[in-house]
């Protein structure tokens, strides 16, 4: 093919950078402790629909026991884990390393979910170790942060989240492109309550500032920030419209293809294709 670039050198310098605005919305389903093999039918249906919804990047984080089967049954969507152990291996009965998860088919790991912070006493430093382990194993990470209701009422939401980010995010050369942040206010998870669009925007802008301080302006601008907490098909479009929201981390509404697809279609702008 005979393709000639325009002659002006200037043209090359004026090419727009691929900005975060060009990224597809990222919609991730966190199945938590739900799902036996019977639920693979939902994963298959989500995967088939994702083939048509190419404007959206879709992923599922099923329980460990379904990672391998989900990867096999659903070939298009991303598949990830809900946690990982920080060590490479060893005498840790019942735990699973990042390398094992990668081997089972996981492309990413969620780390620092508030349910793990609450149920297992995970601190920011633990979350960072897990994120480091997942990245070393060749996976991406979704690092979760979010304030409690008490902290929000005390006017400390943004400072609490900034502290969590500074303590939990992995650092190092080239790491930012492996990281997604999920802002999940603890009081919005599974409650049917959500922050206002203004509150989500303010928090996401504040998270963006922390990311740019930590990773540099450009790398920090490329990190996707998901909102999570009671995202449903009927509120998804509104929540996703908030500033700096690059997608959603969805719990309950990701458990059936029908409701999860409602969210994915909302993220695609309300239309398939
Ligand atoms: P819900 O969507 O059920 O509120 O859960 C959100 C969540 O914790 C996703 O990680």
Image: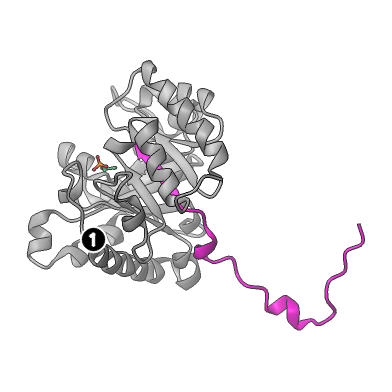
Residue 146 at x, y percent in the picture: 22, 54
Which quarter of the rendered picture does the C terminus lie within? top right
Q: Residues within 10 Å of mark 1 (few under 14, many from 20)?
A: many
Query: In percent of the image, x 73 and y 76: which residue is there?
Result: 12
Q: In the rendered view, would you say 45 is above or below 175?
A: above
Instruction: Tell me the magenta residue range.
Output: 1-30
Query: In percent of the image, x 85 and y 79: which residue is there?
Result: 7
Query: In percent of the image, x 44 and y 45: which residue is there?
Result: 265
Residue 50 in the figure: left or right of residue 109: right
Q: Does the magenta stretch include residue 40?
A: no
Residue under numbered circle 1: 161
Query: In percent of the image, x 28 and y 26: which residue is there?
Result: 34
Regarding ligand 1, which quadrant of the image does it lie in? top left
Q: In which quarter of the image is residue 204?
A: bottom left
Residue 118 at x, y percent in the picture: 16, 42
Residue 57 in the figure: left or right of residue 170: right
- The one nearer the camera, 76 or 63, is 76
Q: In the rendered view, would you say 243 is above or below 174?
A: below
Q: How many labels does the image show?
A: 1
Which residue sits furthest right?
2
Residue 96 in the figure: left or right of residue 2: left
Q: In the rendered view, would you say 77 is above or below 34?
A: below
Q: Does the magenta stretch include residue 9?
A: yes
């Amino acid at each position: 093919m005979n393709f000639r670039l325009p002659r002006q050198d200037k043209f090359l310098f004026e090419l727009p950078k691929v900005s975060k605005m060009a990224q597809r919305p990222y919609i991730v389903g966190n199945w938590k402790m739900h799902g036996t093999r019977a639920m693979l039918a939902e994963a298959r249906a989500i995967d088939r629909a994702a083939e048509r919804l190419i404007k959206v990047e879709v992923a599922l984080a099923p329980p460990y026991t379904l990672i391998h089967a989900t990867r096999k049954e659903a070939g298009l969507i991303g598949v990830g884990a809900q946690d990982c152990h920080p060590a490479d291996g060893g005498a840790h009965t019942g735990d699973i390393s990042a390398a094992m998860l990668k081997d089972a088919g996981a492309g990413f790991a969620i780390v620092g979910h508030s349910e793990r912070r609450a149920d297992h006493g995970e601190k920011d430093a633990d979350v960072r170790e897990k994120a480091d382990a997942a990245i070393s194993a060749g996976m991406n990470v979704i690092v979760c942060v979010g304030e409690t209701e008490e902290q929000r009422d005390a006017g400390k939401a943004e400072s609490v989240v900034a502290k969590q980010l500074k303590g939990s995010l992995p650092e190092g050369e080239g790491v930012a492109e492996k990281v997604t942040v999920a802002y999940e206010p603890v009081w919005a998870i599974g409650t049917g309550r959500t922050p206002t669009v203004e509150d989500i925007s303010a928090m996401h802008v504040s998270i963006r500032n922390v990311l740019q301080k930590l990773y540099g302006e450009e790398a920090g601008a490329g990190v996707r920030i998901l909102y999570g907490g009671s995202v449903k098909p009927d509120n998804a479009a509104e929540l996703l419209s908030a500033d700096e929201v690059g997608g959603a981390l969805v719990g309950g509404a990701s458990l059936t293809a029908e409701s999860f697809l409602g969210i994915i279609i909302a993220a695609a702008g309300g239309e398939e294709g």
